[in-house]
Amino acid sequence: MTDYAIAAPPIPTIPTRDGGAFPVRRVYCIGRNYAAHAVEMGHDPDREPPFFFQKNPDNLDASGTFPYPAQSDDVHHEVELLVALGSGGRDIATEDALDHVWGYGVCLDMTRRDLQGVAKKMGRPWEIGKAFERSAPVGPLYPASEIGHPAEGRVELKVNGAVTQEGDLNQMIWKVPEMIAYLSDYFELAAGDVIMAGTPSGVGPVNRGDVMEATIEGLGTLNVTVS
């Protein structure tokens, strides 16, 4: 038997507001979590139970630059709340769910919409449209111990200074405690898991040279340039 010496890959991290680094284990993304966006994408928000897909932890990127990806001519922005867990478990009760949250941040779920559309039509998973390199620009995490648990607040995205997406955290169909409890029925959650909590309506394309400004009230602004 041959032994192969393979260097361990680095653990992906998200910067924290105080200059630290939050190590990431898994990334769960909830789909169609704002009613207007569900309608925008051709779905009925009143009938569908929550569903999740995953990005890869190393898709998270705090560099402030988003490289336009290969094999797509239609890449869309989606501004989202990011929820970072400091602990986990199975079958977490909704009323206990926020006890597991370490902090919150602003992120973007960049999407190769054309490839996602093909996958939908063929009944295939979405990862080819969602889980590509640097597809999740992210800002610093704010500890819940300092800011609490935001249940409302303006969510906004500007492209080149023009507002394209706007909404409020209180418009989420599935709230943060419900998302955590639901996920824990199917997966064993753990410290380092993060949840991307869905996007309001107004998603649209970006092009090289565009500047995106993603803001969630109380969590600052994430500035990202498309390269």
Image (cartoon, rainbow, N blue to C red):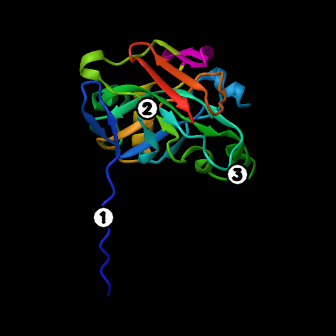
Distance of mark 2 from mark 1, alpha carbons?
A: 26 Å
Q: Earlier in the sequence, mark 2 or mark 1?
A: 1
Residue ID at (32%, 68%): 6
Amino acid, disc 2: Val
Q: Which residues are magenta?
A: 156-171
Amino acid, disc 1: Ala
User: Element under label 2?
Assistant: loop
**Residue at the extreme bottom of the image, as rendered:** 1
Q: State the image coordinates of residue 184 (x, y, percent, origin top left).
A: 39, 41
Q: Earlier in the sequence, mark 2 or mark 3?
A: 3
Asked if labels 1 and 2 touch by Cβ distance under 8 angstroms, the answer is no
Q: Is residue 179 left or right of residue 100?
A: right
Q: Which residue is mark 2?
A: 138
User: What secondary structure do most residues of the magenta stretch adopt?
Assistant: strand
Q: Which residue is mark 3?
A: 123
Q: Earlier in the sequence, mark 1 or mark 3?
A: 1
Residue ID at (70%, 25%): 39
Residue 45 visible, this orientation: no
Identify which residue, 220 or 151, lies in the foreground. 220
Residue ID at (49%, 34%): 65
User: Element under label 3?
Assistant: loop
The reply to whether the magenta stretch includes residue 175 is: no
Q: What number is the disc on residue 7?
A: 1
Looking at the image, residue 122 lies above or below residue 174: below
